[in-house]
Image (cartoon, rainbow, N blue to C red):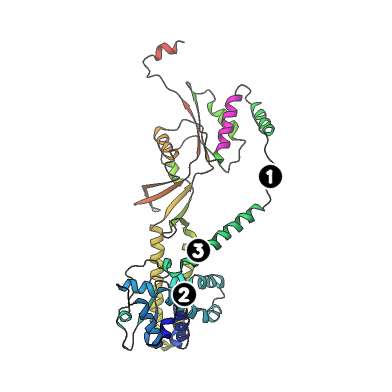
């Protein structure tokens, strides 16, 4: 073993490994065949590297890196960085050739090259076709793959590289904020005189309810803040125009955040308009499912085009039946991914900056549900319930995440007829 082998860093190993792979046409073909599957995030694609194509000192260096690792998984993890970098460099060499065939969705393909290290990180495999003699530590990794599809992205980059990415990400957020800041907005400050003018204008339609108009006005304005001022209008009798004042004031606000109801079922808050999302296990954040589904459906269309292209060949000898079989298998994988996404879907309903105006007394069950939402034990509240599917025949479990809380304004008739002194009070 030469001293040179002891001096090679992960980056040196990756560069020399890529140079060795690029000398063999087999890897060019493998790059072309696996690129689409890496782009769509297929779980059953592996970039295979035959140890016979690696130089002797590379094999020794790889063995040195893992000789102190105890398990096969630890060895795989330790070699992850140099292997991913080497395979990424190999793909980069053939990038112009691949992009030349991707005129239809060139931008997505270019983005796929950017994301390629993350796609490859747990999808490479060592093989030993010719059964050559290998050091014991490296021999244990032949045809080994991680037992579960857990992400190795946390090991893919060093701490310094991660910190650099976080700085870049933060600078991107700063740029977005600066870009939004330069949009033309009405920066004229609202003065107390402006508010007084508005209140006087509204009060002209109900001159004896100025105090209540002011309370409702400030309450609705609070819906755009983190501290809501809820409001309830009580009276002992119906027909005393409780809802009139509430409707009078709320009509001056935009319909974009004011929702008026005469009645509502107790489960209605969980069936409002929202968007479907899935939880990113790495970031812990919910992501809109539509772009993910669209990307997978587009991948299916592209694979079907390849199958059609193979089937259109005139001679049976020209048709690559193995490729067609592989394409059909990949379509099933993508369809399974789509199905899995739908099973993990959570409907997110954003209640922040919303004002619910109830013009009639809400039923007791609805009031209880609203109190649970307003408790704000957590900004995000998860609810699981059964609902009928699109056919209306079968029940299915639905998960709804309510984010934030709305402003609630209600009217209510106070019924004290059950009070044992009601008759006495009624004479007054």
Instruction: Quote the CA–CA distance across marks 2 and 3.
Output: 30 Å
Which label's residue is closer to the chain start, 2 or 3? 2
Which secondary structure type mostly characterizes the magenta part of the structure?
helix
Q: Which mark is residue 152?
A: none
Quarter occupied by residue 104: bottom right
Instruction: State the quadrant of the N terminus.
Output: bottom left
Question: In this figure, which residue is indicated by the disc labeled 2?
Answer: 36
* Residues in magenta, as a range: 210-222
Dot 2 and dot 3 residues touching (CB under 8 Å): no
Closer to the camera in the image, 406 or 377? 377
Q: Is residue 290 left or right of residue 194?
A: left
Q: Which disc is residue 187 wearing?
A: 1
Q: Which mark is residue 163?
A: 3
> Which residue is at a point 50% across and 61% down the rendered structure image?
291
Would residue 336 be seen by someone viewing this image from the given angle? Answer: yes
Distance from label 2 to label 1 (Cα)?
50 Å
């Amino acid at each position: 073993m030469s001293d040179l082998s002891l001096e090679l860093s992960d980056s040196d190993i990756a560069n020399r490994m890529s140079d060795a792979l690029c000398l063999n046409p087999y890897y060019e073909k493998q790059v072309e065949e696996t690129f689409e599957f890496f782009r769509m995030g297929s779980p059953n694609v592996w970039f295979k590297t035959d140890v016979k194509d690696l130089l002797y000192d590379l094999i020794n260096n790889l063995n040195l890196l893992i000789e102190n690792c105890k398990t096969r998984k630890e060895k795989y993890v330790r070699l992850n960085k140099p292997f991913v970098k080497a395979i990424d460099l190999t793909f980069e060499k053939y990038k112009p050739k691949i992009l030349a065939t991707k005129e239809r969705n060139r931008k997505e393909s270019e983005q796929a090259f950017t994301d390629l290290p993350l796609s490859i990180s747990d999808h490479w495999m060592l093989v030993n076709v010719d059964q050559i003699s290998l050091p014991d530590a490296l021999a244990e990794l032949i045809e080994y793959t991680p037992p579960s599809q857990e992400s190795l992205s946390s090991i893919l980059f060093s701490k310094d590289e991660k910190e650099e990415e976080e700085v870049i990400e933060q600078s991107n957020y700063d740029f977005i904020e600066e870009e939004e800041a330069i949009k033309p907005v009405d920066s004229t400050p609202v003065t107390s005189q402006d508010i007084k003018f508005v209140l006087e204008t509204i009060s002209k339609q109900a001159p004896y309810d100025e105090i209540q108009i002011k309370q409702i006005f400030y309450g609705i304005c609070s819906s755009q803040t983190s501290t809501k001022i809820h409001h309830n209008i009580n009276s002992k009798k119906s027909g005393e125009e409780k809802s009139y004042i509430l409707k009078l004031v709320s009509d001056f606000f935009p319909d974009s955040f004011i929702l008026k109801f005469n009645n509502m079922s107790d489960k209605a808050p969980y069936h409002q308009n929202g968007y479907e999302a899935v939880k990113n296990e790495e970031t812990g954040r919910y992501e809109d499912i539509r772009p993910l589904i669209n990307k997978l459906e587009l991948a299916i269309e592209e694979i079907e085009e390849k199958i059609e292209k193979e089937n259109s060949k005139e001679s049976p000898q020209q048709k690559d039946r193995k490729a067609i079989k592989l394409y059909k298998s990949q379509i099933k994988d993508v369809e399974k991914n789509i199905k899995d996404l739908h099973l993990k879907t959570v409907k997110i309903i954003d209640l922040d900056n919303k004002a619910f105006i109830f013009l009639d007394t809400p039923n007791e069950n609805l009031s209880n549900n609203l109190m649970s939402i307003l408790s704000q034990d957590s900004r995000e509240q998860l609810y699981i319930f059964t609902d009928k599917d699109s056919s209306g025949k079968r029940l299915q479990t639905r998960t709804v995440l309510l984010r934030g809380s709305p402003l609630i304004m209600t009217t209510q008739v106070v019924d004290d007829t059950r009070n044992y002194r009601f008759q006495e009070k009624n004479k007054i």
